[in-house]
Image: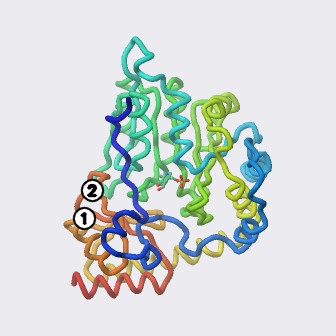
């Protein structure tokens, strides 16, 4: 029985909570998810409407993998598509961590750079692995500290490391040369690099460029292309690694709508580019507005950022009563913070107006 494993805590709407509070989900303005608030490209909407529902999906997502392969200059055999990156995180743990019950030597170590996305710990826990953490601190603006991380890699036998780059919730970035060095020096460690938010940081170098056998790069298409409801992500790695992931993949894991939407999204890069450029401007406006109200947002490279508020939970509850949702960061071990993702101009203005009324 795996009942002892704690569920990961997530942002986004908690439908049961809203029902208890008598709040209609459509009335909530969600600053707690880090997605592109402009929504999906009209081409994606059209593709979804055109897609027949009665057919089983392509189990291999061939068309989408070919399009991704061309975009990323890798072969389709180096890609596996998932029902969101969340599924790929579990697949990676399933494929590469040996369940501790089956292992005489004891538990395998999984290293996590915290505070970060909760699914890494859950995936490791489900496999009975031993989770070790390195933790970024507020004093350095939550920056990654490669030297400290390296000490753990050196002193412990680490089977797998999950690293989120850019990181959620801090929006911090790991310099690629650190990963380059680690991948070389620790060939027995598998580095799972979650680049779910890569598109939100212009010019950021991907771990894909390193082309290492012990790196699996995860990408989400639900954030930048705004199709969270459809679920879509992919992993890129050495062909042998991908075969191992395919082995543990549930059959028909990516539905027809998600595959069609992913293909259409890739064909409308202009929309992605325009919306993300606007989003970056909106983030600057929002930060300026918050600072003018006396708040001190933590600098980040992404569309989202941490905001110290004293009591994150209370702050969230107060905003939710007015139909605005932010991410309480207690589950990240940061109870004094909330995480806010930039939304459209008028929506950000609504947030600022409410903050001025309730908190200033
Ligand atoms: C770092 C990170 N990785 C993965 C995911 C899940 O992405 P997907 O919607 O592709 O499953 C999230 C969602 O919040 C995330 O923050």
> Rounded to the nearest whole Å, what is the CA distance between mark 1 and mark 2?
7 Å
Q: Is residue 184 left or right of residue 304?
A: right
Image quadrant for the N terminus? top left
Q: Position of residue 20 (x, y in %)?
A: 31, 68
User: Number of callouts in the render?
Assistant: 2
Residue at screen point 77% across, 64% down: 267
Element class at badge 2: helix
Q: Residues within 10 Å of mark 1 (few under 14, many from 20)?
A: some
Q: Position of residue 216 (x, y in %)?
A: 58, 38
Residue at screen point 45% across, 16% down: 102
Give the quadrant of residue 272. bottom right
Q: Nearer the viewer, residue 82 or 76?
A: 82
Residue hosting label 1: 313
Callout 1–callout 2 Cβ contact below 8 Å: yes
Element class at badge 1: helix
Residue hosting label 2: 330
Q: Position of residue 135 (x, y in %)?
A: 31, 45
Q: Nearer the viewer, residue 14 or 29?
A: 14
Q: Residues within 10 Å of mark 2 (few under 14, many from 20)?
A: some
Q: Earlier in the sequence, mark 1 or mark 2?
A: 1
Q: Is residue 175 left or right of residue 146?
A: right
Image quadrant for the C terminus? bottom left
């Amino acid at each position: 029985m795996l009942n002892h494993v704690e569920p990961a805590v997530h942002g986004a709407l908690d439908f049961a909570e809203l029902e208890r509070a008598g709040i209609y989900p459509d009335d909530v303005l969600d600053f707690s998810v880090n997605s592109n608030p402009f929504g999906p490209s009209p081409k994606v909407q059209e593709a979804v409407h055109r897609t027949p529902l009665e057919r089983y999906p392509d189990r291999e997502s061939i068309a989408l993998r070919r399009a991704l392969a061309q975009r990323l200059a890798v072969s389709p055999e180096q890609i596996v598509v998932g029902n969101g990156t969340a599924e790929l995180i579990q697949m990676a743990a399933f494929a590469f961590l040996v369940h501790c019950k089956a292992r005489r030597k004891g538990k395998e170590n999984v290293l996590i750079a915290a505070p970060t996305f909760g699914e890494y710990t859950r995936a490791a826990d489900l496999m009975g692995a031993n989770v070790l953490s390195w933790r970024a601190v507020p004093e350095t603006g939550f920056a990654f500290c490669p030297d400290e991380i390296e000490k753990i890699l050196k002193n412990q036998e680490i089977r797998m490391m999950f690293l989120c780059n850019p990181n959620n919730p801090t929006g911090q970035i790991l310099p690629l040369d650190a990963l380059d060095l680690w991948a070389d020096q620790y060939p027995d460690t598998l580095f799972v690099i979650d680049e779910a938010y890569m598109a939100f940081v212009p010019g950021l170098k991907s771990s894909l460029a390193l082309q290492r056998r012990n790196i699996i790069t995860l990408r989400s298409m639900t954030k930048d292309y705004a199709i969270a409801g459809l679920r879509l992500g992919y992993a890129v790695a050495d062909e042998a690694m991908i075969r191992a992931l395919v082995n543990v993949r549930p059959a028909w894991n990516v539905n027809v709508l998600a595959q069609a939407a992913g293909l259409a999204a890739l064909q409308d890069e202009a929309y992605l580019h325009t919306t993300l450029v606007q989003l970056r401007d909106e983030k600057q406006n929002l930060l300026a507005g918050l600072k003018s109200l006396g708040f001190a947002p933590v600098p980040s490279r992404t569309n989202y950022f941490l905001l110290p508020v004293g009591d994150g939970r209370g702050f969230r509850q107060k905003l939710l009563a007015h139909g605005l949702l932010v991410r309480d960061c207690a589950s990240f071990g940061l109870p004094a913070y909330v995480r806010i993702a930039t939304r459209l101009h008028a929506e950000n203005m609504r947030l600022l107006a409410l903050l001025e009324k309730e908190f200033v």
